[in-house]
Image: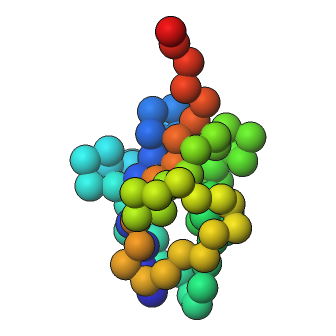
Amino acid sequence: MSVLVKLSTSLREHVPGYDPINGLQVAVNGTSTPLALAQSLNLPEDEITIIMVNGLHAALDTPVHDGDRVAFFPPVGGG
């Protein structure tokens, strides 16, 4: 099973060689979650504020299936 992981801004620094254009294909066994993906990529959980699975807002424990797209976003600031 494989999922496409996309990382936004500062989260990219935690994955050496991350390609912001193509993202990262991650192989997972069985049903996974965004939390398990984040842990496998050594992403600090406290730096993740938004998770999207297939373009929809998701939680850390949302089931992830083969072919899904998972995006992680850090806190967003500005005005």
Residue 8 picture quarter? top left
Q: How many marks?
A: 0
Q: Which residue is drawn at the image coordinates 45% and 33% (left, top)?
A: 9
Q: Which residue is drawn at the image coordinates 65% and 59% (left, top)?
A: 59
- Image spot of residue 61 (x, y percent): 70, 67
**Farthest residue in the front direction?**
56
**Farthest residue in the left direction?**
21
Q: Is residue 12 above or below residue 53?
A: above
- Image spot of residue 26 (x, y percent): 45, 71
Colour mapping used in the image: rainbow
**Farthest residue in the top direction?**
79
- Image spot of residue 14 (x, y percent): 56, 43
Can residue 14 be seen by looking at this rendering?
no
- Image spot of residue 57 (x, y percent): 53, 54
Q: Which residue is drawn at the image coordinates 40% and 57% (left, top)?
A: 55
Q: Which residue is drawn at the image coordinates 49% and 81% (left, top)?
A: 65
